[in-house]
Image: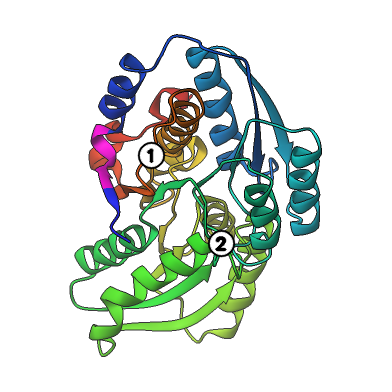
């Protein structure tokens, strides 16, 4: 499948253009939005962007569902959407495999489904997917490591939640670049910390205790794990470059203040707005969206922090 790609820097312009051509409110719509867990700030931001976009488009009742980091809970929410005969669903599935049957049930019930951020595997009939090209995001992390350490580096890789498509793709991107230079760039440890800050800290502490010397770099598949790792590194008085992913406000502040070395911008608000616009346009006009829209992530450092989507949220 060919992806329609949008550079993150022009997402706002694309969103504005889509809003300007959106139809005047034609009917009342009831749309379920389902996030993997609203305990993660990243998904809270995506949910808030969906709610704000619904207000802009008008005539939409948004039903927010929190998957609570549980595939059975998120599946049950999808079953409830069918019972409630909603107009459509926007979902970021916790697990790309475990949520596939639930998504298929919704589609079989005649309810259109847009996925955002995370895909579902092996399900035909999904209206479309809007996300970041997480492979490119992982490659951006790897390329920054090469830029920071041109002579080589020892690397700890904090991986995301097993089964989650962003975790799989970001890890793939990092290895795409660095595996061809394994004589210079050596992974001294790779372990999941499940996208969680506390696990990022405990896993980092455990890894550091088992190494003869500290690594040059810790690359993390999201900012929460990176911030957890940073806490441990600072407590131990170590000098280790730490790269996150998601450009959360707290991570951006840390980059600004010299804590984290970098994070990766993937425009989650832009993903939410584009996905809801596509679903509403289909429901009101019958216009099918591009089946796959990928925003291209890029590294945020001190030098280009002004490019971050959520810069205005910094204290």
- The reply to whether the magenta stretch includes residue 9 is yes
Residue 258 in the image: state x and y as whole percent: 38, 45
For residue 123, the mark is 2
Q: Examine the image and state in which quarter residue 257 appears.
A: top left
Q: Residue sitting at 67 percent across and 59 percent down?
A: 99
Residue 169 in the image: state x and y as whole percent: 43, 66
Q: Examine the image and state in which quarter residue 240 appears.
A: bottom left
Residue 106 drawn above or below residue 15: below
Residue 310 in the image: state x and y as whole percent: 42, 30
Q: To which residue does mark 1 refer?
A: 289
For residue 107, the mark is none
Badge 1 marks a residue whose secondary structure is loop
Q: Residue sitting at 44 percent across and 36 percent down?
A: 253
Dot 2, crowdedness within 10 Å: few (<14), some or many (≥20)?
some
Residue 23 in sight in this render: yes
- The reply to whether the magenta stretch includes residue 257 is no
Question: Range of the magenta residues?
Answer: 5-10
Q: Nearer the viewer, residue 82 or 137?
A: 82
Q: Is residue 296 left or right of residue 47?
A: left
Question: Which comes before the other along the chain, label 1 or label 2?
Answer: 2
Q: Residue sitting at 32 percent across and 49 percent down?
A: 297
Residue 112 drawn above or below residue 202: above
């Amino acid at each position: 499948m060919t992806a329609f790609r949008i550079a993150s820097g022009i997402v706002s312009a694309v969103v504005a253009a889509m809003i300007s051509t959106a139809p005047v409110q034609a009917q009342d719509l009831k749309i379920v939005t389902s996030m993997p867990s609203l305990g993660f700030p990243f998904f809270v931001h995506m949910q808030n962007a969906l709610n704000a976009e619904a207000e802009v488009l008008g005539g939409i009742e948004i039903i927010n569902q929190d998957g609570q980091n549980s595939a059975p809970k998120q599946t049950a929410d999808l079953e409830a959407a069918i019972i409630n005969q909603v107009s459509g669903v926007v979902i970021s599935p916790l697990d790309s495999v475990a949520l596939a049957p639930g998504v298929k049930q919704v589609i079989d019930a005649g309810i259109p489904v847009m996925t955002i951020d995370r895909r579902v595997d092996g399900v035909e009939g999904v209206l479309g997917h809007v996300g970041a090209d997480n492979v490119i995001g992982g490659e951006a992390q790897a390329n920054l490591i090469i830029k920071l350490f041109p002579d080589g580096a020892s690397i700890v890789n904090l991986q995301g939640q097993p089964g989650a498509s962003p975790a799989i793709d970001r890890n793939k991107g990092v290895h795409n670049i660095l595996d061809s230079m394994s004589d210079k760039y050596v992974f001294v440890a790779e372990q999941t910390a499940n996208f969680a800050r506390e696990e990022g800290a405990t896993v980092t502490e455990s890894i550091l205790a088992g190494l003869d010397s500290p690594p040059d770099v810790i690359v993390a598949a999201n900012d929460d794990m990176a911030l957890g790792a940073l806490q441990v590194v600072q407590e131990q008085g170590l000098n280790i470059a730490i790269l996150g992913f998601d450009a959360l406000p707290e991570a951006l502040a840390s980059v600004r203040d010299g804590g984290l070395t970098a994070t990766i911008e993937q425009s989650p608000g832009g993903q939410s707005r584009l996905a809801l616009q596509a679903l509403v346009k289909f429901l009101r006009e019958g216009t099918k969206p591009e089946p796959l829209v990928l925003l291209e992530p890029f590294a945020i450092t001190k030098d280009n922090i002004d490019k971050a989507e959520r810069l205005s949220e910094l204290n």
